[in-house]
Each structure stands twice: as C-alpha cells, then as structure tokens.
Amino acid sequence: EDQVTQSPEALRLQEGESSSLNCSYTVSGLRGLFWYRQDPGKGPEFLFTLYSAGEEKEKERLKATLTKKESFLHITAPKPEDSATYLCAVGNNQGGKLIFGQGTELSVKP
Amino acid sequence: DGGITQSPKYLFRKEGQNVTLSCEQNLNHDAMYWYRQDPGQGLRLIYYSQIVNDFQKGDIAEGYSVSREKKESFPLTVTSAQKNPTAFYLCASLMLGELFFGEGSRLTVL
C-alpha cells in the first residue's frame, strides 16, 4: 500500500536555527514527490516537485532533496514568516492521484 | 487572475441536511479533486474527475456525491449519510503533475 509519513509532527525553532523536515514514502512507481506549504485556514501552496533520486531544488531559505526512500526539506536560517504546516505528497502510477503525509507544523520564534 | 474559487468559506449545517460546496476554476485544467482535511491528518481524497461527465471515488467517498457537467465546475455534496462531516474541504485542479488548491471550505455540523 502506498504510504507517506512525515516527521516530526511539530517542530519549534528559534529564528536563524536551521533544521530539516523528513518525508518517508513507499509507492508503486513514483510519479513525483511534492512539497506544499499551508497556512492556517488556507489551501496548500505549491513549493517543489522532485522526480528522481539525487534531485535537489531550492527556493529562498528552502531546499528539497530526494532519495529512493525519503525526501528532506531543509530550512536554512528560518524566519518567523516561515511558520506554517509543510505537506509532502507522492504521485503513483495509478494516474492523477496524490497520497499526502500528515504534515509537519513548523513554528519559528523571533 | 486565474485560480480556483471555493464557496462558501464557512458553512454550518444541522444534522440530517445535505449541503453542497462549490468549486470553480478558470485554469482550463481537465482534472479536479476534492480532499478532506482533519486536524493532525493528511489530506484524504474524496472524489476526483479527470474529464467532464466522468468521476471516480477516492479513498473516503461514502456519504459524498459529485457532478462534473462543466469543465470549470466540480461541486461536492455532503449528504446526511456522512457520519462525521465536520471538516475542512479542499478543492484542487491538476496540470503537469502539480495540484493547484482553492482556499478551502470549513463545514461545521451543529
């Protein structure tokens, strides 16, 4: 069964304290791994798509990496405005469906 | 601006009533999705449609119904058969592997 597990469930950081969020997955035929940011009461906002092991993508203080079993979202020198829930999802070979993890709630204190 | 519009943003329902959540998109995307989000859980797929006049059940379709009469519209009806309907509902459309989300509708059953 396709599955996505994110850890930790919640992460509290001080401003400037770098860290990483983990997304472990098992999937029948990976068709992309997706990272989203979700603010309270809002819809998720797309961040990155990774397709193959070894691929990396960056956007401002965020960097996403991918291996055959997991993905990391690295946050360098975070700021309070980075506080949000970060969702990971994978696409499988059954066409058009994404399987989501439960998310990591990040809080960055000034 | 192009995007996905969900309405209403907040909805209250008495037990035994059916309610319909609206989802409209002007992105010209073929595929549309409905997800349900509960606190501490990932997004769970209710229904999806890859083309007009066709839709498939997701992982938690019981108690829900949809229609796809127009490319732009994918309304979701929460019926009285849904035992625990209080949740945050998200509509999305898909293009080139990326999901675009609306701002969500929060349904509360009184």
Image (tube, coloured by chain):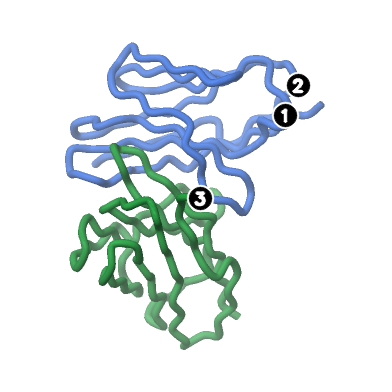
Chain colours: A blue, B green
Residue at mark 3 to residue at mark 1: CA–CA distance: 32 Å
In this picture, residue B36 sits left or right of residue A106: left
- In the picture, the quarter occupied by the C terminus of chain B is bottom right
In this picture, residue A83 sits left or right of residue B35: right
Residue at mark 2 to residue at mark 1: CA–CA distance: 6 Å
Of B14 and A34, nearer the camera is A34
The outermost residue toward the right is A110
Q: Give the answer, above or below, for where A19 lies relative to A90.
A: above
Kindly state the secondary structure of the residue where label 3 is placed: loop
Q: Are marks 2 and 1 in contact (CB under 8 Å)?
A: yes
Tell me if mark 3 has few (under 14), some (14-19) or many (20+) residues whose alpha carbon lies within 10 angstroms of its own.
few
Q: Amino acid at mark 1?
A: Val
Q: Amino acid at mark 3?
A: Asp
Residue behind mark 3: B1
Residue A15 circle label: 2
Residue behind mark 1: A108
Q: Give the answer, above or below, for where A8 lies relative to A42.
A: above
The outermost residue toward the front is B1
Q: Amino acid at mark 2?
A: Glu
Have a look at marks 2 and 1 and say if they share a chain: yes
* x and y percentages locating residue A108 in the rendered image: 72, 29
Kindly state the secondary structure of the residue where label 2 is placed: loop
Of A77 and B100, nearer the camera is B100
Of B31 and A93, nearer the camera is B31
